[in-house]
Image: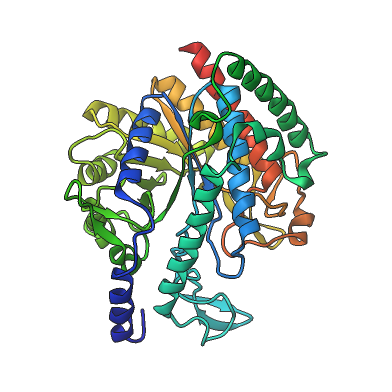
Amino acid sequence: DYPCEEDVAKVHKQMCDLPPLVFAGECRNLSEKLAKCSRGEAFWLQGGDCAESFEEFSANHIRDTYRMLLQMSVVMMFGGGIPVVKVGRMAGQFAKPRSAPTETIDGKEYPSYRGDIINGPEVSLEARVPNPNRLVKAYHQCSATLNLIRGFSTGGYARLSRVDQWNLDFMEKSDEGKLYMDLAARVDDAITFMEACGVGPQSSIMSQTEFYVSHEALLLEYESALTREDSTTGLWYDCSAHLVWVGERTRQLDHAHVEFLRGVGNPLAIKISDKADPEELLGAIEALNPENNPGRLAVIVRMGAEKLRERLPLLLRAVNDAGYKVTWVCDPMHGNTEVINGFKSRRYEKIRAEVEAFFDVHEQEGTIPGGIHLEMTGKDVTECTGGGSSVEPQNLGSRYETFCDPRLNAEQSLELAFYIAQRLRQRRQNS
């Protein structure tokens, strides 16, 4: 849809000469961790904005999302007694698939907004024209985001002894904030015990964390430009992110997105809805992970609670019977989108119900619930109703800030993390 292919080719050549954003060794490390998730030895926490934007880009915004994911991981690790693999929907989650090429606003038709990496959200024909120069701007924003994340992860911000300082100011008096501070005090006691046992505060386990980034590999002009050959293995890696996934709209086996992902060495994910039948899923797994390596492929299910209880058992049995090794992940967001009081929104109660169904079905089938995939933010937004933050339908407009789909706010995210920790603890005790 770009108006000038020559401009696209020029930008693509420019990006091919830019440094990689991530490195092949980091991708292999993440694959090893996802293999542990597939065996129930760890749990994958993936979260971030529905779509990143140029306008919202700031150190504070990155820090708050990062800090929220740290809090959620501590809740799950301490409450569930299992390592948590932290993966952000960050540093690349710009492009968004749209169901129609145009949209009607105030009675006038415009090209659909497809994410800041493609066109602008402003309501004008000029802003909606795809501009390849936005790829370069997105690259530099991703580079700055990753630089900050790496600094947070290794520079002391993620030190476990700071666990009580990660709470967001507006959550101090909330029920979830108080629960978190109580847990933080218990973590602090555990750290004191570990230090008495000889695990010093300067050990990497105590002072650093590993944090990975991911996005949907939707815009192949961007992904292909950042694909590099690894000098140590000779394999090709998409160096725009540690993990990339193919979505529900682009997972067809004869489409370019699956063909591209087949050729890169990154850990991958595929999103499926209740529309996917077992044979279709088996074909996708065979295409994306023909060597059946654990940690290579995650299957992210997005169905809604009722349909998940009906459809997921069939998929689990088919994959099990075929002997395929995948990491099963729950996306409780995309199957629960609706219009509430004039706003595109989601109900926390339905999101939690889908997570509950995900754990229940795996328990019934004797399979492994490997992770959770959330659209969330560390900000005090009002985009999803319900939960402990008590966002009512009439409150949605007060702090509705998303550029695309509604996100869980900080309180709702933390509340869900406590529930997941409870289910992980139950699973550990039962096994």
The answer to which of 61 and 43 lies nearer the viewer is 61
Residue located at (33% from left, 71% from top): 15
Residue located at (45% from left, 59% from top): 92
Residue located at (37% from left, 49% from top): 242
Report whether residue 188 is seen. Answer: yes
The answer to which of 68 and 393 lies nearer the viewer is 68
Number of marks: 0
- Which residue lies most toward the right here? 173
Q: Which quadrant of the view contains residue 301?
A: top left
Report whether residue 377 is seen. Answer: no
Horizontal side, residue 268 vs residue 191: left or right: left
- Residue 412 lies, in percent from the top left, at 68, 42
Q: Which quadrant of the view contains residue 298?
A: top left
- Residue 429 lies, in percent from the top left, at 52, 12
The answer to which of 23 and 281 lies nearer the viewer is 23
- Residue 143 lies, in percent from the top left, at 46, 61
The answer to which of 14 and 52 lies nearer the viewer is 14
- Residue 396 lies, in percent from the top left, at 74, 57
Q: How is the image coloured?
A: rainbow
Tell me if residue 107 comes above or below residue 85 in the rendering: below
The N terminus lies in which quarter of the figure?
A: bottom left
The C terminus lies in which quarter of the figure?
A: top left
Tell me if residue 245 comes above or below residue 314 in the rendering: below
Horizontal side, residue 391 vs residue 154: left or right: right
Tell me if residue 134 comes above or below residue 404 in the rendering: below
